Amino acid sequence: MVNPPRIDLDACQGHGRCYHLAPAIFRPADEVGHAEVIPGVEITDRDRPALDRAVAACPEMAIDWDAGPTS
Ligand code: SF4
């Protein structure tokens, strides 16, 4: 099991890169395009690459993710 990310809603500007790069983890939360983590999502090791890309691509550094140890 991989720790879920968190989005800093004050920092998020709605660029949408996260949910385009990792649509199994993030989704748009409003009409402006701010993001949210899909409620109840279970993140597996298989999701790590997409999540890594989303974190790296967020221009506002609004995604906080402690990747934890790899299994
Ligand atoms: S890429 Fe960053 S700023 Fe853009 S919607 Fe996702 S969390 Fe928000």
Image (spheres, helix red, strand yellow):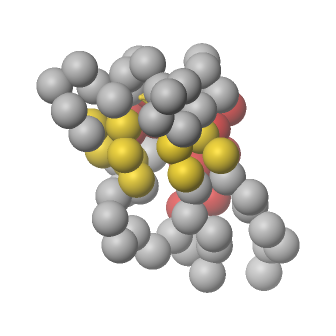
Tell whether 29 sits left or right of 9.
Answer: left
> What percent of the width, then of the height, locates residue 25?
41, 55
Which residue appears farthest toward the front when viewing the image? 10
Residue at image coords 33%, 58%? 38
Q: Quadrant of residue 71?
A: bottom right
Q: Is residue 27 left or right of residue 50?
A: left
Look at the picture and state if 56 lies above or below 39.
above
Determine if residue 57 is in view.
no
Front in this rendered view, residue 38 or 10: 10
Q: Is residue 29 visible?
A: yes
Give coordinates of residue 44: x percent, y percent: 56, 73
| Residue found at x 52% / y 43% | 7
Would residue 70 be found to the left or right of residue 4 on screen? right
Residue 8 image point, x, y percent: 54, 38
- Determine the image quadrant of residue 29: top left
For the image, the number of numbered tags is 0
Residue 65, compared with residue 7, is above or below; it is: below
Q: Quadrant of residue 4?
A: bottom right
- The N terminus - image quarter: bottom right
Q: Residue at x 65, y 28 (%)?
A: 61
Residue lying at the far left of the rendered structure: 31
